Amino acid sequence: MGLVGDRQPARPSRDLRFFDVVGETLPSIGLARAAARATNGWALDAVRTAGKAAAEQLESAVAPYARPLIEEHRAAAANSCSPRRRRTNW
């Protein structure tokens, strides 16, 4: 069983196809780093609240096959012997 199995994902957007073909580029890495630096000083409680609100709205947009897959991966991570600690306070 792979990540998707016999279920077919939705057709990817043009941006995702571009990333699949070109991959990560120096400009995209720079933009990601700049975005991370721009959040310096944000109130963590406000960020968590905004993230939870966004997650509630996005959850209904997730493809039907994705929810069980996400739960399967979470369960596997919880039972993992990985040396990394799993963050649960997000």
Image (cartoon, rainbow, N blue to C red):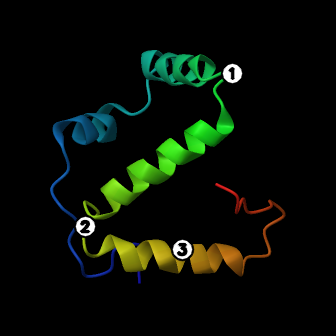
Q: In the image, 90: left or right of 6?
A: right
Reading the chain from its start, which is encountered first: label 3 or label 1?
Answer: 1
Q: Are marks 3 and 2 in contact (CB under 8 Å)?
A: no
- Image position, residue 3 (x, y; %): 41, 72
**As shown in the figure, which amino acid type bears the numbered disc 1?**
Gly
Cα–Cα gap, marks 3 and 1: 32 Å
What type is the residue that disc 3 sits on?
Answer: His
Q: Mark 3 = which residue?
A: 73
Q: Could you say which is closer to the camera, residue 78 or residue 52?
A: 52
Q: Nearer the viewer, mark 2 or mark 1?
A: 1
Please report whichever mark, 2 or 1, sits nearer to the chain's N-terminal start: 1
x, y percent for residue 84: 80, 59
28 left or right, relative to 79: left
Q: Secondary structure at mark 3?
A: helix
Kindly report which numbered mark, 3 or 1, lies closer to the viewer in this rendering: 1
Q: Is residue 18 left or right of residue 90?
A: left
Q: Is residue 1 left or right of residue 39?
A: left
Gap in angstroms between the C-alphas marked 2 and 1? 34 Å
Q: Nearer the viewer, residue 75 or 57?
A: 57
Dot 2: element? loop
* Quarter placement of the C terminus: bottom right
Which dot, 3 or 2, sits closer to the camera?
Answer: 2
Mark 1, residue position: 41
